[in-house]
Amino acid sequence: MHPHPSPHPPNRQTLYVATALVLGIVVGELLNLTFTKDSATLLHSIEIFTVLTDIFLRLIKMIIAPLVLSTLVVGMAKMGDVNTVGRIGLKAMLWFFSASLFSLLLGMVLVNLLQPGSTLHIPLPALSATTGLPEVKPTLSSFADHMFPKSIIDAMAGNEILQIVVFSMFFGVACASLGELARPTVKLLDSLSHIMLKITSYVMHFAPVAVFSAMAAVIAQNGIVVLLSYGLFIGEFYFALLLLCTTLGAFAFLFLRRRIWSLLRHIREPMLLAFGTASSESAYPKLLQQLERFGCDDKVCGLVLPLGYSFNLDGSMMYMTFAVLFIAQAYGIDLPISEQFLMLLVLLFTSKGVAGVPRASLIVIAATLSMFHVPEAGLLLLLGIDQLLDMGRSATNVFGNSIAAALVSRWEKALAH
């Protein structure tokens, strides 16, 4: 796949998104100060903002399934044999599990050091309060349900990335083994992937509006005040994310050397987009484009990125340990280190089982809380600021996946200069 010319110079588009982010905060705070919390004007404005963000996220989701399918199948067909696919997949999965475990561990160490739950000066929710989250217990069978498709149409309709990956692998390997006979199909899918990336460049024009609306809606609803009462917790969480990104970046530097700076330049727009919309998915098409521009092998990206979106959500992993231990601290429950390690292992595997479920990390946290007898109602402490935390973890997820794609390309000696 060839790099595609950007609709704007990349730095200008990044500037638009960053400006939209700041404007959203200003407009949101003005609305919050001008109107009371239950005023019709405020609620109406928030509804308009939410709809605008929703339109953008829907347009992005519309692109993801055909894009993943086409890039993966073409990549597999070009790799030509199962061994290469297996080798790249294995390297990617080893990296994913190492990075996930590291994120969980770092989160655990920092929460124990910083004790954010102990310094919270707000009333705790009643133990009987309900969180309103769907009851989804992460089990082995739910993991299998999310992984193996019973119908590819169904998987694409539900944007189940993992199922699309499994189908595409079979399809791509079959195309490779049939050679000449499958060439027209591969050619068709190759052209489909270019079409989807072209559509991405059209949809991206709308990104600043979406980021502006997402920010304005959050701030209009809660005001900057929410940042003050939770300021310490939010600050500590973002510090932890920064530490995680720095460590992952430093590890990548060992292999990429000076090129790590070029990688950061290429991924800043997808990261800003994920940050502004609080959705890692919103950055997927743009990230694929930017990684190929940076020099990652398109075949490697086509396989590593969709797998990463299911298995390598470093920011979300850190959020899970942070949230569970924060709630335990807030209720004054002291979890011994042995239980915390058990919790890490539980999170490492259960988090892989709910990929594709909306607000998946909150559902995993709820399941983990009940497992370790910490009041689930404690989640209500986080629901108000979940969007603000989600922004950081979505951007970190994007960062983690781009590091994974760059490293696997490098290890495969497939990183262009």
Image (cartoon, grey):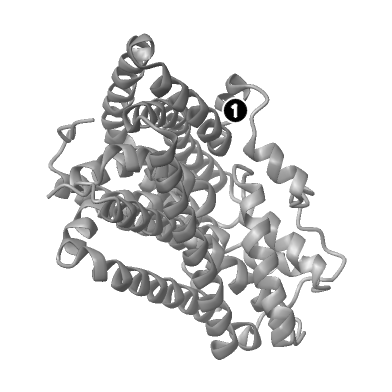
Against 376, is 109 above or below?
below
Residue 356: x %, y % from top left: 60, 42
Quarter containing the N terminus: top left
Q: Nearer the viewer, residue 129 or 407?
A: 407
Q: Is residue 380 left or right of residue 243?
A: right
Residues 92 and 22: in front is 92
Would residue 254 be found to the left or right of residue 307 on screen?
A: left
Residue 61 visible in the shown view: yes
Q: Residues within 10 Å of mark 1 (few under 14, many from 20)?
A: many
The structure residue drawn at horizontal position 59% and vertical position 73%, both measured from the top left corner, is: 322
At 42% from the left edge and 40% from the top edge, which residue is drawn? Answer: 83
The residue at which mark 1 appears reads as 155
Q: In this view of the protein, which residue sits in the foreground, 63 or 164?
A: 164
Write the residue at 60% across / 30% down.
Answer: 158
Q: Position of residue 154 (x, y in %)?
A: 62, 23
Number of numbered tags placed on the structure image: 1
Residue 126 pos. (x, y %): 83, 71
Residue 257 quadrant:
bottom left
- Could you tell me the amino acid type at mark 1? Ala
Tell me the SS state at disc 1. helix
